[in-house]
Image: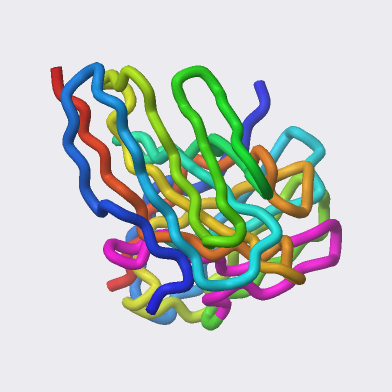
Amino acid sequence: EAQVTQNPRYLITVTGKKLTVTCSQNMNHEYMSWYRQDPGLGLRQIYYSMNVEVTDKGDVPEGYKVSRKEKRNFPLILESPSPNQTSLYFCASSITRSWNEQFFGPGTRLTVL
Amino acid sequence: KNEVEQSPQNLTAQEGEFITINCSYSVGISALHWLQQHPGGGIVSLFMLSSGKKKHGRLIATINIQEKHSSLHITASHPRDSAVYICAVSQTGTASKLTFGTGTRLQVTL
């Protein structure tokens, strides 16, 4: 089954404790992206990747890092999480750079205390 | 002012009604996307448009590039259409960068 998986689905952590949210897709897609969703602000793009070792900033990259060492994986790294990074995070992938038929992961709800 | 504005923010309809959700944008775009977010949180891509009109089942999406406006129509609405509908644009020159509207919450009742 074609899918995007994210882990963990739920995470409660404390300020400053480094964490990684994993994202993996099994569709051989070149394009992958991370978004955060907040009430009243909607979805906002954090980082995206066009291929292995090629990444670029979205609208809200501050406080986040990404890496794309393999085509299927695109982890999101929070080196020193802060409470304003409490949010719902989605990973997505697409076969096209214009995000036609984008496949979304199930979401990761992160709380930073 | 947000670059992508959706209206209405909330919409309640009775089963069978024709529904229109609007999206206006203030930037040059290469494409416009409509997404659906289910009550459980999952997000599905519905359409990508760069001109004209697309139809899939009871869903129709249109775009007017000159007026910088798109509409998503749902014909013969059903309670299972209850969801948040989200508009997003790929800006000209940055096709992989997406900017989203804040969504329209649709509730269809029996």
Give me the residue at 35% from left, 53% from top. Answer: B103
| Closer to the camera in the image, A3 or B32 | B32
User: Is B103 in front, or is A38?
Assistant: B103
Q: Quadrant of residue A57?
A: bottom right
Q: Position of residue B17 (x, y in %)?
A: 24, 23
Per the image, is A45 magenta?
yes
Quarter of the image where one finds residue B76 = top left
State the residue lying farthest toward the front.
Answer: B66
Q: Is residue B73 left or right of residue A54?
A: left
Compare residues A26 and B5 and report the one nearer the observer: B5
**Residue B51 relative to residue A62: left or right:** right
- A23 relative to B98, above or below: above
Name the main secondary structure of what is drawn in magenta.
Answer: strand
Task: Name the quadrant of the C terminus of chain B.
Answer: top left
Rendering coords of residue A49 (x, y %): 75, 61
Q: Who's the residue at 33% across and 70% down the image? A: A112
The answer to whether B27 is drawn above or below residue A75 in the figure is below
Quadrant location, the N terminus of chain B: bottom left
Identify the coloring: rainbow
Residue B96 falls left or right of residue A90: right
Q: Residue at horizontal 50%, vertical 30%?
A: B60
Residue A56 percent coordinates (x, y):
73, 72
On screen, residue B61 above or below B96: above
Who's the residue at 17% across and 36% down the image? B12
What range is drawn magenta here? A38-61
Residue A55 is inside the magenta segment: yes
